[in-house]
Structures are given as structure tokens and as C-alpha cells.
Image (spheres, rainbow, N blue to C red):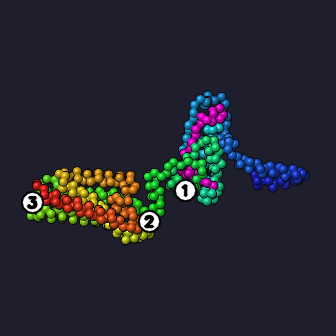
Amino acid sequence: MRRSMLPAFIAALMRRSTHPAVVIVLVGTLLAAPSAVAAQTGEALIKSIGAQSPVPNPTFVADKSVAYKVAWDVTAGPAKPGDRTPGLAAPANFLVNTDVNGVDRKRVHLAIVVHGAATFALMTNAAYKAMYGVDNPNIDLLQALDAAGVQVILCGQAAIRRNIARDQLLPLVKVPDADGPVARAIRQSIELSRTFRGYVWLNAFSQNFAQLGTLFAVLLGSGGLGAETAGTLFTLSLPVSRRALMATRAASGLAELFALTMIPSLVISLFAPVIGEHFSLLDAIVHGGCFFVATTLFFSLTFWLSTTVADVWRPGLIACAVAVFIGVCEAALDQVAPFGIFHVMRADSYFYNARVPWVGLLVAVALSAMLLCSAVVAIERRDF
């Protein structure tokens, strides 16, 4: 009986001269009935939710001698925040079914893997209510399933993407390791993307610019005078010293590299107001400068290789292989990464702590100068 019908029901009883004590008992029973259903927990709740109509004369009966290991992928959320997540009923139904078939619970090993919109069902009542304004209707069933041995596993990436902290989850929820490099990278990208400066640094200076800048530096450094081609011999026959030729070649390549690294940084700063954002001109200059100095090292390496390797393509390929090797080492060795060339290229210390990586810049400049000078000496001493 609906609570809205109680006044009419009580009035009818009173008109029939029913004793007031009887009326009180009947009304109390009606009010307590829904509460008793709602208060079901443990096995009673599992049997209630997992109840099914009996199948007469089944032709496929569960084997009582085998172990059942079943996992469900639960992704869909409820239609309304006050409703139970539908996928959580599947293990309850399975438990009831195996009980009906006489399968020992020790042979039943169940798990639900939750992600997607269903992730919120695993939140504590306080966190759920703060988000939706209603109590979490899934807690009683989750606790019953946990008591019955059903593992409740939450995809770690689902929690990260929805900014759900570990203390916002029910204690019974198991979460795989979320401290690996992939999980850390996802958390970092989420946090950085909250601001325009962080978004620009993450997607431009930390990723796209670093990769493309290294590639362009290698391409600009290729094509030196190392290969004994007709064009190389003609160039060396001109009334110009080899030192002057190499210096001009290096200067023109570095000028092009400077334009490729500085202009994009300045463009971001100049055009950010067009979309209602702001990117400091100082930040653009510092990031562009670090970007240029770091890529100069790869330019100089390729430039030097072009004077020692008698081939057009191998210097560039070797330089790219060196860049990949350094990148992998910096990613694998956290304690080395802050001092690596890509750390300087991204200007990590400046972005996080407003400190220009002067030491890394000076080392990169020194190594680049050494490689360029070595390339000039190699050409001067070479007998074509």
C-alpha cells in the first residue's frame, strides 16, 4: 500500500468503529513493511535481487564437480542516481542459480570489473551524496556480494579519468596498481590540462615540439661535405676556405633551426588572447630558447656525423637512433631524467619551479660547440 493512501485507509477503519489499538497495529505493520524490504542485507538481499523463476525439467544442469570462475564487465550506470547500477545484479543472480543447482560456494569464484559510468557506484555514501545529492543505493548490494566472496575490482584508469580519489571509494573495492608510468602520465595530463599554460606545455613543448624539433634539427644537420659527390667536390674547388664553407653551412642551419624553434613559441603567446587565454611572453622566450639550445645539440651531432660518414642518409639515421636511445633512458631512469637533454628541451624546471636549467643549457652549448669544431677540423684535414 502506498503511503499516500494511508489517511483514507485509517479513516475507513475508524468509520467501521475499529478499535484504536487495532488501527495502530495495522498502520505500524504497513509502515514497517517497506522498511523491512529496504533493510535486507547479506544473503537475504542477494536472494531477493538474484531471484528467478524456476525452470521446470531443465535439460542443462550445472556440474557440481567443477570450479566456476566468472567475471563481469560492468560499465553502464543507472538511469537515475537513486537507482542501483544494473550490472551489479549479475553476480547475485549467478549465486542464486548455483545455490539452486546445489553447487558448493567454495567452487564459485566471481568478480566484477567496473569502469565507465558505473565507476561512481563504488563511491562511499558521503562522496556519492556530495556528488548527486542522494544516498548511494549500491552499497548494501556491494557489501553483500563482498561478504559472499565476490571480488569488486575498479579499473584504475576509470578512477583517474573521473578524478575519484582512493579515499572516496568503498573499502571493499580493489584497485589495480595506479602508480605505474602510464597511470602517472594520465594523472599528470589531467592536472596540467586544467590551465592554459599547463595545456600548452604538455601538448606543445613537452610532446609535439620536442619530437618535431629533434627531427628538424637532424634534417637540417644532414647533407654535409662528408660524401664524395660531384657537388661536394665542386664546392670544395671554389676559392673559399673549407673553414669558411663549414662555418657558413653551420650558421645557416642554426639560423633556420632558431626560426623553427622560436617562432611557434612566440605565436602561441601573441595569439592566445584570440581565444581568451594568456601565455606570458617571457614564458614563450624561455621555452623557445631552451628548445633551440637543446635541439642544437642534435643538429651539431648530425653535422659532425655528416663529415665523418661517407653517406647521405646514415648520419641522420644514426642521430635519430641516438635521440631515441636518450629518450628511452630518460624515461626509464627517473633519477637521470632531470639532467637529460629532453629535460632541458622541455624546460621542466622552469615550468614547475620557475628555474631556468642553466647547467643543462651550458652543457648543451659546450657539447654543440665541440661537435661543430670537430666537424670543421675533420673537413679541413680530409683529403678528397
Q: Position of residue 383 (x, y in %)?
A: 10, 55
Q: Residue at x 21, y 65 (%)?
A: 251
Q: Amino acid at mark 2?
A: Phe
Would residue 275 be counted in the magenta stretch? no
Q: Which residue is mark 3?
A: 237
Q: Position of residue 74 (x, y in %)?
A: 56, 46
Q: Amino acid at mark 1?
A: Ala
Q: Nearer the viewer, residue 54 or 108?
A: 108
Above or below, comparing residue 272 to residue 298 in the picture: below
| Circle 3: element type | loop
Q: Which residue is mark 2?
A: 196
Disc 3 to disc 2, C-alpha distance? 54 Å
Tell me the mark number nearer the camera, choosing from 2 and 1: 1
The reply to whether dot 3 and dot 2 touch (C-beta < 8 Å) is no
Question: Of the residues under marks 3 and 2, which one precedes in the sequence?
Answer: 2
**Relative to residue 360, is residue 247 drawn left or right?**
left
Q: Position of residue 41 (x, y in %)?
A: 69, 46
| Circle 1: element type | loop
Q: Which residue is mark 1?
A: 165
